[in-house]
Every structure is written in C-alpha cells, then in structure tokens.
Amino acid sequence: MTSESKSVLTGGCQCGAVRFAVSVAPAKISICHCRMCQKASGAPFASLADIEHADFKWTRGKPAAFQSSSIAMRDFCADCGTPLSFRRIDGPHIEIMTGTFDRPDRLVPTRQFGTESRLGWVVGIANLPSQTTLQNYGPEKLGGVVSHQHPDHD
Ligand SMILES: [Zn+2]
Ligand SMILES: [Zn+2]
C-alpha cells in the first residue's frame, strides 16, 4: 500500500497503540470455530477477514506475535492484549480479526471452518433474551462510564 488515501478500511486494537489500514475490500471473510481460534480470541469463535499482505499495512505501532503452531503466527497488541490476526508463516495473506475493524459491520462472513469444535449453543444466540448496553446499564450508570477505548477512526 502506498498512501493513506487508498485505505478503504481501517482498524486497530482497543487501546489504539496498534492501527492498520486495508486498501482493498476483503473478499474472503470467515468464522473459525477451531480450538486454537477459541483460545487466541478468548471467545467462542473467531471472525477473520483474509487480506493479501500487499493490500495491508500496520499504520501505527507494531503488534507482538505468538507462534501458535509450526505454520502460524497470531498478532496481538502487547499493551492492551487485543487479538489482531492469524497468519501463515511466510504466507502471502494475513487474516484480521473482524471485531478490530472500525466498521466491523462491513465484514460479513460467508463461510465457517473448524466446525469440529463449534459449540452447540452458538447457532441459537439470536433467540436469547436481548438488551442494548443502555438498557442493560441504564442511562445514569452508563453516563458515568469513562471509556479508555480508542475511537473507531484514526
Ligand atoms: Zn492496544
Ligand atoms: Zn481457527
């Protein structure tokens, strides 16, 4: 990527020490339920956008990395711990955790992998009782919360 103006999507970690930009809209977006993605994300599954290294750039800071297997690295922010990527060692692609994008709504998964580890309840979450954060906390309590999260823009 040669210039900031070519960025079509941006994102970063929760504290903002690490930021990234993508110059082409990712075509392959997937959910992975594998046990390694569960551990690495600290969540029931990971959601990943596949991007060619040529179309991707870290624009602020550099992530730390953990070699999770003989073939793969997982990048994360050393300051706040946000999981950021999965990538094959020396491969042409990097897969970015879609929750770290400034507009995660633009990254819509079309495939699932690692379904041998898919937790049975995942398919039913739309049917669970639901509340917004405001409904859950109430205006007074939520109004007193001071966010330390980086805003969803550079
Ligand atoms: Zn961070
Ligand atoms: Zn996985």
Image (cartoon, grey):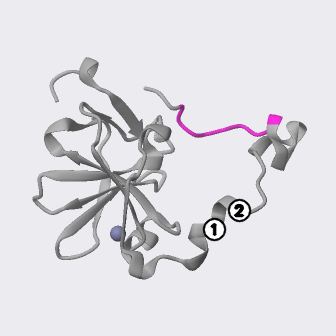
| Above or below 108: residue 119 | below
Foreground residue among 145 and 133: 133
Mark 1 surroundings: few (<14), some (14-19) or many (≥20) residues within 10 A: few
Q: Inspect the image, locate mark 1, and give the three-letter code of the amino acid beneath it.
A: Gly
Tag count: 2
- Pointers 2 and 1 in contact (CB under 8 A)? yes
Q: Inspect the image, locate mark 2, and give the three-letter code of the amino acid beneath it.
A: Asn
Q: Is residue 15 left or right of residue 56?
A: right
Foreground residue among 66 and 21: 21
Q: Is residue 144 visible?
A: no
Q: Is residue 85 left or right of residue 104?
A: left
Q: Position of residue 138 (x, y in %)?
A: 87, 42
Residue picked out by circle 1: 124
Quadrant housing residue 11: top left
Q: Is residue 141 visible?
A: yes
Q: Position of residue 102 (x, y in %)?
A: 46, 35
Mark 2 surroundings: few (<14), some (14-19) or many (≥20) residues within 10 A: few
Could you tell me what secondary structure mostly forms the magenta stretch? loop
Magenta stretch in the rendered image: 143-151
Quadrant housing residue 62: top left
Q: Residue at x 43, y 40 (%)?
A: 101
Q: Is residue 6 left or right of residue 120?
A: left
Q: Position of residue 33 (x, y in %)?
A: 42, 71
Q: Secondary structure at mark 1?
A: helix
| Above or below 3: residue 15 | below
Q: Is residue 72 left or right of residue 76?
A: left
The label shown at residue 127 is 2
